[in-house]
Image (tube, rainbow, N blue to C red):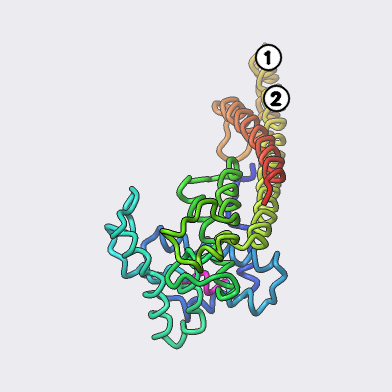
Amino acid sequence: MKIENFDFYDRTSLKSYNLDKTMQDQLNALSQLDVFTRKHCENVAAITCRLCEYLHCSKGFTEYCTICAYLHDIGKLFIPPAILQKPSKLTDEEYEVMKTHTTIGYQMCMKDERLRPYAAGALYHHEALNGTGYPTGLTKNDIPYEGQIIRVADEYDAIVSKRQYKTHVGITDTLKIIIDNTKPLEDVKKSDAMNEIIMNAKSGKDNPVIVKTLIKVVIDDINYEIFCTQEYVDSLKDDIKRLEKAEKYYEKMKSSKNKSKEDYYYQYAMMYLEKGEDINNFIQIKEEYKKAYSTRKERIDTLYDEIKKIKKLKL
């Protein structure tokens, strides 16, 4: 039987850009990050690569932007673990410390000639179009395009990871949050905001074009998950049919009244069994396959429903 194998971020072209070799030379610093942050950096890079492709960016910019994305959180090396790994909400003081990972990461990149070309990822990925981001509160076109792309990829993976999705089921709620970040602030009071921020309140935090592109990427990935799951379902279906044939001969074997016929049907039953299966366990295995088949079929239906929900989302 084919083993089910689906990777949430598998739909990338990273290998086609030969980034593995590049990263060996330029991204060794990632190995020093904690496992969660390192995985997050890899995921954000994968999503960024997909976004660049769907946005029809050049191959050179896509390579550049992807490496920037790998490095975007490198400054977290110097954030205290008690803050970086805190499960509950950060205090205002802790949040100010956390925000410094952008400037720390930028300084790290600028000090290393190999990383210097990719410093923008670390510096700009938390800037927002409406000026409410950090570290410098840039607005609109003042934020480099790579920073705008990585910001969306970063938000998406952060929410997905927090919710511990293993499949795209339920991903619509994540996209709703990101869509909300494309919308203008509803309540901006002059008493608690600078005039410049008020002027930019007509913009949301995220670039809507990039968010629309993210939705296309997610739908494509859901279809890919459906394809992978359907392949597994088809494989299960074949195995169930095979074991049902074995069971037919097994039942004839048990009802045989002489040894020669019993051996005859036993040999036929064994012809349908594969490695790890024997005359004593194959019926139990068949029932497990049938249960898995039913579960995966239901998931495929749910994934199709998820696509319908996503397509109804409005920016």
SS at mark 2 in the image? helix
Q: Residue at x 55, y 26 (%)?
A: 280
Residue nearest the viewer, comparing 199 with 272: 199
Looking at the image, the residue that sits furthest to the bottom is 113
Mark 1 / mark 2, whichever is N-terminal: 1
**Inter-mark Cα distance, 1 to 2:** 10 Å
Choose top left, top right, bottom left or bottom right for residue 243: top right
Residue 81 locus on image (x, y percent):
29, 60
In this rendering, is residue 95 above or below 62?
A: above
Q: Which residue is mark 2?
A: 264
Choose top left, top right, bottom left or bottom right for residue 297: top right
Placement of the N terminus among the 4 image quadrants: top right
Q: State which region is magenta.
A: 66-71
Q: Residue at x 55, y 28 (%)?
A: 281
Q: Amino acid at mark 1?
A: Ser
Tell me if 110 is positioned left or right of 230 in this view. Answer: left
The main secondary structure of the magenta stretch is: helix
Q: Amino acid at mark 2?
A: Tyr
Residues at badges 1 and 2 in contact (C-beta under 8 Å)?
A: yes
Residue nearest the viewer, comparing 150 with 92: 92
Q: Is residue 221 visible?
A: yes
Q: Is residue 271 visible?
A: no
70 part of magenta stretch? yes
Residue 290 locus on image (x, y percent):
63, 28
Q: Residue at x 48, y 46 (%)?
A: 164
| Circle 1 Cα neighbour tier, 10 Å, few/some/many (<14 / 14–19 / ≥20) | some
Q: Which residue is mark 1?
A: 256
| Circle 2 Cα neighbour tier, 10 Å, few/some/many (<14 / 14–19 / ≥20) | some
Residue 67 locus on image (x, y percent):
54, 74
Label for residue 308? Answer: none
